[in-house]
Image (cartoon, rainbow, N blue to C red):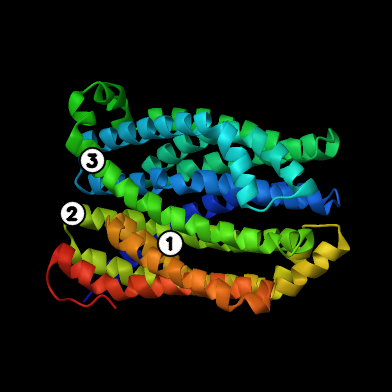
């Protein structure tokens, strides 16, 4: 049984990681929110829908590689738990090296990827033209995004969340300023939104590199990169197996989001624009609550590195309780202020009216989804990636069935299916958790 001192220390550790992560994630969300808000001031539904489709294309293209961040957090945290600076340096080198390889590969695919992706998202007419403009510019920043993901994951895994927070705030101030200047002052429209994002991503890369270079283990990174054992088969195999599972899991999650966009596109530009605003509210809440996921990745990863079963179990319980409280609080805030906030994202009365019709889903999603975010962090930190993939696959299969069953409900059926998808993910993870703890640590102590 944990003492009050142990509980207090654990809660402080959770919030020391979660709070800066939440603020960092809110700063990250401002990229999408600023883009959507600024383009919405033009009062052009096709331009707003084009940015929504283009942003989802870039999400689908890049977020499937988010394992560069999550996998690096887990490996860096486990190395830190063992106090192994050489392993921390090797983790950084392998992650950044893999990011460069993947980024160059995506650039080679660019002539095929853009038209195929926009067609997959059912972009047509003026929406397709605006989305093509947006993606044609932002695509060049894909390599920067991948390298940034690797460096941010490494810093978070070493509990340097405060440095990441300061950087994200600075990058977003620059991004919002560029959005306002390029779109509202220069009149560049959708192209201005894309150029603002690309420029701020480049500045973030330079600043991240400077922060990482100042970390102790990073000073050995160049030497580590030249050591053959860093690139040995077993070392790379472990990294690639972990990242393979995370890649496939993220691919399924991204597919679920793209299906949300594609099905919404069949309802026309008004519903698509409205869904883009509801999605931004959802992603804002998810990014805030992902602070608990980051805490889970680091604290559970460190516990696994130390082979500390009791500490792992205490962390799981505390994280789930804090997550539930956070989800309920955001749902309450959205219930009180979500509708006028959502309506501020467009000056088109038809878009506003359509958004308000579906706004209640933004209220429900934080409380329904938070458990799945926390469990994701627990599973990643413990490197139970195969089980994470299995639960995601099962939930995705259910989601596909639900989309068919709820089709007659229209856009409400679409959001209902997505909400149940989040619930199914958490249910599957909760069912597997006790067995995974016994397998990793031994013993029969309960987790629930």
Q: Where on the picture, by quarter, is residue 299?
A: bottom left
Please name the residue that numbered disc 3 is placed on. Answer: 237
Q: In the shown orientation, is residue 130 left or right of residue 145?
A: right
Residue 4 place in picture, x, y as percent: 29, 73
Q: State yes or no: discs 1 and 3 in contact (Cβ < 8 Å).
A: no
Circle 2 — which element? helix
Image position, residue 288 (x, y; %):
53, 60
Q: Would residue 145 appear left or right of 181 to someone viewing this image?
A: left
Q: Residue at x 70, y 40 (%)?
A: 132
Q: Residues within 10 Å of mark 2 (few under 14, many from 20)?
A: some
The image quadrant of residue 419 is bottom right
Identify the residue at the far left of this view. Answer: 443
Residue visible at 23% across and 30% down in the picture:
231
Q: Are marks 2 and 3 in contact (CB under 8 Å)?
A: no
Q: Distance between the residues labelled 2 and 1?
A: 21 Å
Tell me which numbered mark, 2 or 1, is placed earlier along the sequence: 1
Q: Observer-nearest residue: 256 or 316?
A: 256
Dot 1 alpha-carbon crowd within 10 angstroms: few under 14, some 14 to 19, many 20 or more? many
361 in relation to 10, above or below: below
Q: Is mark 3 on a helix, strand or loop?
A: helix
**Mark 2 or 3, closer to the camera:** 3
Classify mark 3: residues with Cα within 10 Å, few (<14), some (14-19) or many (20+).
few
Q: Against 103, is 248 above or below?
A: below
In the picture of the structure, the residue carrying the numbered disc 2 is 306
């Amino acid at each position: 049984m944990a003492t009050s001192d142990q509980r207090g220390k654990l809660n402080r550790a959770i919030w020391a990681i979660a709070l800066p992560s939440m603020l960092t994630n809110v700063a990250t969300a401002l990229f999408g929110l600023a883009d959507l808000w600024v383009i919405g001031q033009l009062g052009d539904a096709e331009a707003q829908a084009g940015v929504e489709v283009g942003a989802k294309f870039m999400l689908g293209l890049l977020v499937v590689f988010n394992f560069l961040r999550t996998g690096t957090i887990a490996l860096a945290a486990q190395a830190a738990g063992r106090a192994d600076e050489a392993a921390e340096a090797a983790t950084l080198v392998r992650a950044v090296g893999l990011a460069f390889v993947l980024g160059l590969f995506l650039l080679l695919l660019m002539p095929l990827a853009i038209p195929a992706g926009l067609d997959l998202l059912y972009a047509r007419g003026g929406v397709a033209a605006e989305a093509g403009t947006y993606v044609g510019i932002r695509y060049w920043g894909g390599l920067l995004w991948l390298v940034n993901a690797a460096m941010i994951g490494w810093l978070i895994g070493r509990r340097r969340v405060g440095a990441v927070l300061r950087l994200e705030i600075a990058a977003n101030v620059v991004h919002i300023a560029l959005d306002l200047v390029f779109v509202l002052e220069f009149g560049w429209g959708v192209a201005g939104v894309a150029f603002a994002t690309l420029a701020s991503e480049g500045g973030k890369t330079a600043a991240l590199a400077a922060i990482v270079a100042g970390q102790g283990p990073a000073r050995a990174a160049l030497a580590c990169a030249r050591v053959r054992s860093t690139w040995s088969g077993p070392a790379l195999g472990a990294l690639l197996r972990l990242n393979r599972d995370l890649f496939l899991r993220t691919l399924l999650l991204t597919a679920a989001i793209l299906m949300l966009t594609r099905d919404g596109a069949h309802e026309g530009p008004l519903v698509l624009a409205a869904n883009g605003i509801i999605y931004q509210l959802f992603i804002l809440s998810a990014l805030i609550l992902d602070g608990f996921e980051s805490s889970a990745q680091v604290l559970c990863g460190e516990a696994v590195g130390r082979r500390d079963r009791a500490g792992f179990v205490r962390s799981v319980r505390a994280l789930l309780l804090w997550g539930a409280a956070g989800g309920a609080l955001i749902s309450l805030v959205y219930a009180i202020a979500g509708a006028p906030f959502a309506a501020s994202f467009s000056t088109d009365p038809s878009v506003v009216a359509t958004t308000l019709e579906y706004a209640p889903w933004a209220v429900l999603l934080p409380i329904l989804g938070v458990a799945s975010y926390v469990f994701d962090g627990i599973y990643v930190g413990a490197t139970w990636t195969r089980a994470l993939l299995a639960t995601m696959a099962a939930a995705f299969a259910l989601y596909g069935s639900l989309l068919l069953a709820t089709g007659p409900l229209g856009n409400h059926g679409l959001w209902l299916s997505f909400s149940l998808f989040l619930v199914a993910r958490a249910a599957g993870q909760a069912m597997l958790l006790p067995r995974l703890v016994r397998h990793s640590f031994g013993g029969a102590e309960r987790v629930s």
